[in-house]
Image (cartoon, rainbow, N blue to C red):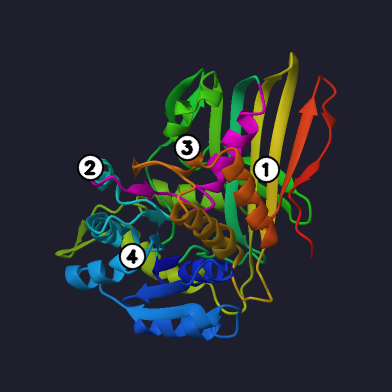
Amino acid sequence: MRMLVLGSGLMGPAAAYNALQDREVQRVTLADLSFAQLEAAQSKLARLPGFDRLSLRAVDLNQWNATTRLIRDHDVVIAALPGAIIATGLRAALAEHRPWVDLSWPAPDQVESLRREAQEAGVLVIPGCGVEPGLTEIMARHLAEQMDRVEELHIKCGGIPVQPEPPLGYKIVFGGRRLPLRPYNAFMVEDGQLVSVPRYSGVELIHFDGVGEVEAWHEGFVPWLLELDALRNLKTGTQKTIRWPGFAAKVTVLKDLGLLSDEPIDVDGAFISPKRVLDALLYPAVQMTESDRDLTLMRVDVIGEEEGRRMMRTAEMVDRYDEALGFTSMARVTAFTAAIVARMVARNELAGTGLITPEQLITGSAFTQLVEELAAMEIRFDETPASGPCGHHETTRLYPAQR
Protein backbone atom coordinates (compact mmCIF):
# COMPACT_ATOMS: atom_id res chain seq x y z
CA MET A 1 0.00 0.00 0.00
CA ARG A 2 1.36 3.42 -1.01
CA MET A 3 -0.15 6.51 0.56
CA LEU A 4 0.21 10.17 -0.38
CA VAL A 5 -0.34 12.92 2.19
CA LEU A 6 -0.79 16.39 0.70
CA GLY A 7 0.08 19.15 3.17
CA SER A 8 2.77 19.16 5.85
CA GLY A 9 1.43 21.70 8.35
CA LEU A 10 0.08 20.64 11.75
CA MET A 11 -2.05 17.80 10.34
CA GLY A 12 -0.10 16.15 7.52
CA PRO A 13 2.86 14.82 9.55
CA ALA A 14 0.46 13.24 12.06
CA ALA A 15 -1.40 11.48 9.23
CA ALA A 16 1.91 10.25 7.82
CA TYR A 17 3.04 8.97 11.23
CA ASN A 18 -0.17 7.02 11.78
CA ALA A 19 0.03 5.44 8.34
CA LEU A 20 3.66 4.43 8.89
CA GLN A 21 2.70 2.41 11.97
CA ASP A 22 0.84 -0.03 9.70
CA ARG A 23 3.26 -2.60 8.25
CA GLU A 24 0.96 -3.06 5.25
CA VAL A 25 1.96 0.44 4.18
CA GLN A 26 5.04 0.16 2.00
CA ARG A 27 5.59 3.86 1.52
CA VAL A 28 4.15 7.20 2.62
CA THR A 29 4.93 10.34 0.63
CA LEU A 30 4.45 13.67 2.39
CA ALA A 31 4.16 16.49 -0.13
CA ASP A 32 3.95 20.26 0.20
CA LEU A 33 4.73 23.46 -1.67
CA SER A 34 6.76 24.76 1.28
CA PHE A 35 10.33 23.49 1.69
CA ALA A 36 10.40 24.97 5.19
CA GLN A 37 7.35 22.99 6.28
CA LEU A 38 8.73 19.80 4.74
CA GLU A 39 12.00 20.28 6.61
CA ALA A 40 10.12 20.84 9.87
CA ALA A 41 8.08 17.70 9.25
CA GLN A 42 11.24 15.73 8.51
CA SER A 43 12.80 16.87 11.79
CA LYS A 44 9.69 15.79 13.71
CA LEU A 45 9.28 12.41 12.00
CA ALA A 46 12.96 11.41 11.74
CA ARG A 47 13.04 10.22 15.35
CA LEU A 48 9.79 8.25 15.15
CA PRO A 49 9.12 4.65 14.05
CA GLY A 50 8.58 4.08 10.33
CA PHE A 51 10.67 7.01 9.10
CA ASP A 52 12.61 4.72 6.75
CA ARG A 53 9.42 4.30 4.66
CA LEU A 54 8.73 8.04 4.39
CA SER A 55 9.47 10.16 1.33
CA LEU A 56 9.25 13.94 1.16
CA ARG A 57 8.29 15.74 -2.04
CA ALA A 58 7.98 19.40 -2.93
CA VAL A 59 5.02 19.91 -5.26
CA ASP A 60 2.95 22.81 -6.55
CA LEU A 61 -0.59 21.54 -7.04
CA ASN A 62 -1.11 24.16 -9.71
CA GLN A 63 1.42 22.27 -11.84
CA TRP A 64 -0.97 19.72 -13.33
CA ASN A 65 1.48 17.27 -14.89
CA ALA A 66 3.73 17.09 -11.83
CA THR A 67 0.72 16.65 -9.54
CA THR A 68 -0.90 13.89 -11.58
CA ARG A 69 2.41 12.02 -11.88
CA LEU A 70 2.82 12.15 -8.11
CA ILE A 71 -0.73 10.97 -7.42
CA ARG A 72 -0.49 8.20 -10.03
CA ASP A 73 2.23 6.49 -8.01
CA HIS A 74 0.02 6.04 -4.92
CA ASP A 75 -3.05 4.03 -3.96
CA VAL A 76 -4.87 6.69 -1.94
CA VAL A 77 -4.55 10.40 -1.18
CA ILE A 78 -5.00 12.06 2.21
CA ALA A 79 -5.60 15.80 1.89
CA ALA A 80 -4.52 18.14 4.68
CA LEU A 81 -4.73 21.27 2.55
CA PRO A 82 -5.95 24.86 2.76
CA GLY A 83 -9.49 25.09 1.46
CA ALA A 84 -8.54 27.26 -1.51
CA ILE A 85 -6.40 24.54 -3.13
CA ILE A 86 -8.49 21.44 -2.32
CA ALA A 87 -10.43 21.43 -5.60
CA THR A 88 -7.23 21.64 -7.65
CA GLY A 89 -5.69 18.63 -5.93
CA LEU A 90 -8.93 16.66 -5.95
CA ARG A 91 -9.41 17.08 -9.69
CA ALA A 92 -5.91 15.71 -10.25
CA ALA A 93 -6.80 12.67 -8.13
CA LEU A 94 -10.01 12.16 -10.11
CA ALA A 95 -8.04 12.29 -13.35
CA GLU A 96 -5.83 9.48 -12.03
CA HIS A 97 -8.78 7.55 -10.53
CA ARG A 98 -7.29 7.62 -7.04
CA PRO A 99 -9.53 7.78 -3.94
CA TRP A 100 -9.33 10.94 -1.85
CA VAL A 101 -9.79 11.27 1.93
CA ASP A 102 -9.98 14.88 3.07
CA LEU A 103 -9.69 16.36 6.55
CA SER A 104 -11.76 19.30 5.34
CA TRP A 105 -14.16 20.32 2.56
CA PRO A 106 -13.74 22.17 -0.73
CA ALA A 107 -15.13 25.70 -0.94
CA PRO A 108 -18.96 25.59 -0.69
CA ASP A 109 -19.45 26.88 -4.24
CA GLN A 110 -17.36 24.01 -5.62
CA VAL A 111 -18.93 21.08 -3.76
CA GLU A 112 -21.73 20.20 -6.19
CA SER A 113 -19.55 20.33 -9.30
CA LEU A 114 -16.91 18.18 -7.58
CA ARG A 115 -19.63 15.78 -6.46
CA ARG A 116 -20.69 15.30 -10.09
CA GLU A 117 -17.10 14.93 -11.29
CA ALA A 118 -16.30 12.31 -8.63
CA GLN A 119 -19.41 10.32 -9.52
CA GLU A 120 -18.63 10.47 -13.24
CA ALA A 121 -15.03 9.36 -12.57
CA GLY A 122 -16.23 6.47 -10.40
CA VAL A 123 -13.86 7.53 -7.60
CA LEU A 124 -14.57 7.50 -3.86
CA VAL A 125 -14.10 10.91 -2.22
CA ILE A 126 -14.57 11.24 1.55
CA PRO A 127 -14.64 14.89 2.68
CA GLY A 128 -14.74 16.11 6.27
CA CYS A 129 -12.97 13.03 7.63
CA GLY A 130 -11.40 14.40 10.81
CA VAL A 131 -12.78 14.98 14.27
CA GLU A 132 -15.52 17.50 13.41
CA PRO A 133 -16.72 16.95 10.85
CA GLY A 134 -15.91 13.26 10.92
CA LEU A 135 -15.76 11.49 14.26
CA THR A 136 -18.65 13.48 15.69
CA GLU A 137 -21.07 12.36 12.99
CA ILE A 138 -19.69 8.80 12.98
CA MET A 139 -20.27 8.57 16.73
CA ALA A 140 -23.73 10.12 16.41
CA ARG A 141 -24.76 7.38 13.98
CA HIS A 142 -23.24 4.68 16.21
CA LEU A 143 -25.22 5.83 19.24
CA ALA A 144 -28.43 6.42 17.28
CA GLU A 145 -28.40 2.94 15.74
CA GLN A 146 -28.45 1.35 19.20
CA MET A 147 -31.84 2.93 19.91
CA ASP A 148 -35.30 2.18 18.55
CA ARG A 149 -36.20 5.83 18.12
CA VAL A 150 -34.07 8.97 18.41
CA GLU A 151 -35.75 12.28 19.19
CA GLU A 152 -32.77 14.43 20.18
CA LEU A 153 -29.14 14.64 19.10
CA HIS A 154 -26.65 17.04 20.66
CA ILE A 155 -23.03 17.21 19.47
CA LYS A 156 -20.37 19.28 21.21
CA CYS A 157 -16.73 19.35 20.14
CA GLY A 158 -13.74 21.65 20.16
CA GLY A 159 -10.00 22.05 20.51
CA ILE A 160 -8.71 24.46 23.15
CA PRO A 161 -5.36 25.40 24.70
CA VAL A 162 -4.67 23.86 28.09
CA GLN A 163 -3.85 27.34 29.40
CA PRO A 164 -6.18 30.02 28.01
CA GLU A 165 -4.49 33.35 27.37
CA PRO A 166 -5.86 36.77 26.37
CA PRO A 167 -7.41 38.08 24.27
CA LEU A 168 -9.61 35.11 23.26
CA GLY A 169 -8.41 32.20 25.38
CA TYR A 170 -7.87 30.32 22.13
CA LYS A 171 -5.06 29.14 19.85
CA ILE A 172 -5.30 28.03 16.21
CA VAL A 173 -5.01 24.29 16.74
CA PHE A 174 -5.93 23.13 13.23
CA GLY A 175 -3.35 25.05 11.24
CA GLY A 176 -3.12 28.06 8.97
CA ARG A 177 -3.15 31.72 9.91
CA ARG A 178 -6.89 32.42 9.89
CA LEU A 179 -9.19 32.13 12.89
CA PRO A 180 -12.14 29.76 12.30
CA LEU A 181 -14.71 32.51 12.85
CA ARG A 182 -17.73 32.98 10.60
CA PRO A 183 -20.33 35.76 10.61
CA TYR A 184 -23.30 33.89 9.12
CA ASN A 185 -26.03 31.98 10.92
CA ALA A 186 -25.92 28.32 11.89
CA PHE A 187 -28.45 25.49 11.58
CA MET A 188 -30.18 23.51 14.28
CA VAL A 189 -33.11 21.10 14.20
CA GLU A 190 -36.27 22.33 15.91
CA ASP A 191 -39.58 20.44 15.77
CA GLY A 192 -38.05 18.21 13.10
CA GLN A 193 -37.11 21.08 10.80
CA LEU A 194 -33.81 22.77 10.02
CA VAL A 195 -33.93 26.33 11.31
CA SER A 196 -31.40 29.14 11.25
CA VAL A 197 -30.06 30.57 14.51
CA PRO A 198 -27.36 33.17 15.23
CA ARG A 199 -23.89 31.67 15.36
CA TYR A 200 -22.32 31.96 18.85
CA SER A 201 -25.80 31.85 20.43
CA GLY A 202 -27.27 29.09 22.58
CA VAL A 203 -24.31 29.25 24.96
CA GLU A 204 -24.29 26.55 27.63
CA LEU A 205 -21.72 25.65 30.26
CA ILE A 206 -20.67 21.99 30.46
CA HIS A 207 -18.21 20.06 32.60
CA PHE A 208 -15.53 17.55 31.61
CA ASP A 209 -13.74 15.55 34.28
CA GLY A 210 -10.10 16.56 34.54
CA VAL A 211 -10.73 19.73 32.54
CA GLY A 212 -13.42 21.72 34.31
CA GLU A 213 -16.10 24.01 32.94
CA VAL A 214 -16.18 25.02 29.28
CA GLU A 215 -18.81 26.63 27.07
CA ALA A 216 -20.51 25.41 23.91
CA TRP A 217 -22.41 27.47 21.32
CA HIS A 218 -24.19 26.98 18.00
CA GLU A 219 -21.75 26.23 15.15
CA GLY A 220 -24.21 24.54 12.83
CA PHE A 221 -26.02 21.20 12.61
CA VAL A 222 -24.84 19.13 9.64
CA PRO A 223 -27.98 18.86 7.44
CA TRP A 224 -27.08 15.53 5.82
CA LEU A 225 -27.29 13.77 9.19
CA LEU A 226 -31.05 13.89 8.69
CA GLU A 227 -30.62 11.51 5.74
CA LEU A 228 -29.63 8.67 8.11
CA ASP A 229 -32.43 6.18 8.81
CA ALA A 230 -31.57 6.19 12.52
CA LEU A 231 -32.29 9.94 12.71
CA ARG A 232 -35.44 10.08 10.59
CA ASN A 233 -37.58 10.89 13.69
CA LEU A 234 -35.25 13.56 15.05
CA LYS A 235 -37.13 16.43 16.66
CA THR A 236 -34.26 18.44 18.14
CA GLY A 237 -30.64 18.59 16.99
CA THR A 238 -27.74 20.85 17.86
CA GLN A 239 -24.08 20.92 16.94
CA LYS A 240 -21.97 23.20 19.10
CA THR A 241 -18.33 24.22 19.33
CA ILE A 242 -16.48 24.06 22.65
CA ARG A 243 -14.26 26.86 23.92
CA TRP A 244 -13.20 28.22 27.28
CA PRO A 245 -15.97 30.33 28.90
CA GLY A 246 -16.33 33.86 27.58
CA PHE A 247 -15.23 33.15 24.01
CA ALA A 248 -18.69 33.42 22.42
CA ALA A 249 -19.41 36.79 24.04
CA LYS A 250 -16.13 38.24 22.76
CA VAL A 251 -16.60 36.91 19.24
CA THR A 252 -20.20 38.13 19.13
CA VAL A 253 -18.89 41.66 19.68
CA LEU A 254 -16.44 41.18 16.78
CA LYS A 255 -19.29 39.89 14.61
CA ASP A 256 -21.59 42.77 15.52
CA LEU A 257 -18.82 45.23 14.64
CA GLY A 258 -18.53 43.67 11.18
CA LEU A 259 -15.00 42.42 11.80
CA LEU A 260 -15.77 38.84 10.72
CA SER A 261 -16.84 39.87 7.23
CA ASP A 262 -14.75 38.82 4.23
CA GLU A 263 -16.43 41.49 2.10
CA PRO A 264 -13.82 44.16 1.25
CA ILE A 265 -14.49 47.71 2.37
CA ASP A 266 -13.00 50.96 1.08
CA VAL A 267 -10.41 52.39 3.46
CA ASP A 268 -8.89 55.54 2.02
CA GLY A 269 -9.08 54.13 -1.48
CA ALA A 270 -7.81 50.66 -0.59
CA PHE A 271 -10.26 47.74 -0.50
CA ILE A 272 -9.58 45.56 2.54
CA SER A 273 -11.42 42.58 4.07
CA PRO A 274 -12.14 43.24 7.78
CA LYS A 275 -11.62 39.54 8.56
CA ARG A 276 -8.18 39.51 6.94
CA VAL A 277 -7.17 42.52 9.02
CA LEU A 278 -8.51 40.85 12.17
CA ASP A 279 -6.63 37.63 11.39
CA ALA A 280 -3.39 39.55 10.82
CA LEU A 281 -3.80 41.51 14.05
CA LEU A 282 -4.65 38.50 16.21
CA TYR A 283 -2.35 35.87 14.70
CA PRO A 284 0.65 36.64 16.95
CA ALA A 285 -1.59 36.06 19.98
CA VAL A 286 -3.38 32.95 18.72
CA GLN A 287 -0.70 30.96 16.88
CA MET A 288 0.44 27.70 18.49
CA THR A 289 3.98 27.93 19.84
CA GLU A 290 6.43 25.20 20.90
CA SER A 291 5.43 25.65 24.54
CA ASP A 292 1.66 25.50 23.95
CA ARG A 293 -0.34 22.40 24.82
CA ASP A 294 -3.85 21.65 23.63
CA LEU A 295 -6.71 19.28 24.36
CA THR A 296 -9.70 18.14 22.35
CA LEU A 297 -13.12 17.62 23.91
CA MET A 298 -16.08 15.83 22.40
CA ARG A 299 -19.47 14.83 23.72
CA VAL A 300 -22.34 13.32 21.73
CA ASP A 301 -25.76 12.78 23.36
CA VAL A 302 -28.69 10.96 21.77
CA ILE A 303 -32.05 10.83 23.52
CA GLY A 304 -34.98 8.64 22.58
CA GLU A 305 -36.51 5.22 23.20
CA GLU A 306 -34.96 1.80 23.56
CA GLU A 307 -37.01 -1.31 24.33
CA GLY A 308 -39.90 0.86 25.50
CA ARG A 309 -37.81 2.94 27.90
CA ARG A 310 -36.72 6.53 27.73
CA MET A 311 -32.96 6.42 27.12
CA MET A 312 -30.01 8.75 26.73
CA ARG A 313 -26.73 7.49 25.31
CA THR A 314 -23.56 9.56 25.55
CA ALA A 315 -20.10 9.18 24.05
CA GLU A 316 -17.35 11.37 25.45
CA MET A 317 -13.70 11.92 24.58
CA VAL A 318 -10.97 13.96 26.26
CA ASP A 319 -7.67 13.87 24.39
CA ARG A 320 -4.45 15.71 25.23
CA TYR A 321 -1.24 16.84 23.55
CA ASP A 322 1.15 13.92 22.98
CA GLU A 323 4.33 14.79 24.87
CA ALA A 324 6.17 11.68 23.67
CA LEU A 325 5.55 12.21 19.95
CA GLY A 326 5.13 15.97 19.88
CA PHE A 327 1.74 15.95 18.13
CA THR A 328 -1.05 18.29 19.14
CA SER A 329 -4.24 16.66 20.33
CA MET A 330 -6.11 18.19 17.39
CA ALA A 331 -3.62 16.64 14.97
CA ARG A 332 -4.01 13.25 16.68
CA VAL A 333 -7.79 13.03 16.61
CA THR A 334 -8.13 14.66 13.19
CA ALA A 335 -5.25 13.26 11.14
CA PHE A 336 -5.16 9.80 12.72
CA THR A 337 -8.85 9.40 11.85
CA ALA A 338 -8.23 10.31 8.21
CA ALA A 339 -5.20 8.00 7.96
CA ILE A 340 -7.11 5.03 9.39
CA VAL A 341 -10.04 5.59 7.02
CA ALA A 342 -7.69 6.04 4.06
CA ARG A 343 -6.15 2.62 4.73
CA MET A 344 -9.63 1.09 4.82
CA VAL A 345 -10.26 2.68 1.42
CA ALA A 346 -6.97 1.41 -0.01
CA ARG A 347 -7.86 -2.11 1.17
CA ASN A 348 -11.27 -1.83 -0.57
CA GLU A 349 -13.04 -2.20 2.77
CA LEU A 350 -15.24 0.84 2.11
CA ALA A 351 -17.37 0.64 -1.02
CA GLY A 352 -18.79 3.52 -2.98
CA THR A 353 -18.15 6.13 -5.63
CA GLY A 354 -18.67 9.84 -5.64
CA LEU A 355 -18.57 12.21 -2.70
CA ILE A 356 -19.65 10.35 0.46
CA THR A 357 -19.43 11.70 4.01
CA PRO A 358 -17.72 9.52 6.66
CA GLU A 359 -20.77 8.58 8.73
CA GLN A 360 -22.40 7.08 5.63
CA LEU A 361 -19.52 4.59 5.36
CA ILE A 362 -18.13 4.07 8.86
CA THR A 363 -20.61 1.81 10.58
CA GLY A 364 -20.68 -1.78 11.83
CA SER A 365 -17.29 -3.50 11.54
CA ALA A 366 -15.73 -0.38 10.02
CA PHE A 367 -16.75 1.60 13.11
CA THR A 368 -15.29 -1.08 15.37
CA GLN A 369 -12.02 -1.06 13.44
CA LEU A 370 -11.76 2.73 13.54
CA VAL A 371 -12.36 2.94 17.27
CA GLU A 372 -9.95 0.07 17.99
CA GLU A 373 -7.19 1.69 15.94
CA LEU A 374 -7.76 5.04 17.63
CA ALA A 375 -7.57 3.27 20.99
CA ALA A 376 -4.22 1.81 19.94
CA MET A 377 -3.13 5.45 19.56
CA GLU A 378 -4.58 6.09 23.06
CA ILE A 379 -7.58 8.04 21.80
CA ARG A 380 -10.53 6.64 23.74
CA PHE A 381 -14.27 7.14 24.05
CA ASP A 382 -16.39 6.54 27.12
CA GLU A 383 -19.96 5.49 26.34
CA THR A 384 -22.67 5.94 28.95
CA PRO A 385 -26.28 4.77 28.66
CA ALA A 386 -28.73 6.38 31.09
CA SER A 387 -32.27 4.99 31.24
CA GLY A 388 -35.50 5.64 33.06
CA PRO A 389 -36.70 8.65 35.04
CA CYS A 390 -33.94 8.23 37.61
CA GLY A 391 -31.22 8.19 34.96
CA HIS A 392 -29.39 4.97 35.85
CA HIS A 393 -25.84 5.29 34.49
CA GLU A 394 -23.33 2.67 33.42
CA THR A 395 -20.13 3.75 31.70
CA THR A 396 -18.25 1.55 29.24
CA ARG A 397 -14.90 2.37 27.70
CA LEU A 398 -14.94 1.53 24.00
CA TYR A 399 -12.02 -0.72 23.09
CA PRO A 400 -9.50 0.43 25.72
CA ALA A 401 -5.87 0.20 24.64
CA GLN A 402 -3.21 -1.21 26.91
CA ARG A 403 -0.79 1.39 28.20
Please tell me which residue lies in front, 91 or 105. Answer: 91
Give the magenta-colored segment's residue range.
121-147
Front disc: 4 or 2: 2
Front disc: 3 or 2: 2
CA separation, marks 1 and 2?
46 Å
Residue 186 falls in image quadrant: top left
List x then y, in percent, for residue 250: 52, 52
CA separation, marks 3 and 1?
31 Å
- For label 3, the residue is 360
Residue 156 falls in image quadrant: top right
Instruction: Give the quadrant of the C terminus.
Output: bottom right
Say which amino acid is labelled 1: Leu
- For label 4, the residue is 277
Residue 235 against residue 351 in the figure, above or below: above
Please tell me which residue lies in front, 179 or 128. Answer: 128
CA separation, marks 1 and 4?
31 Å
- For label 1, the residue is 205
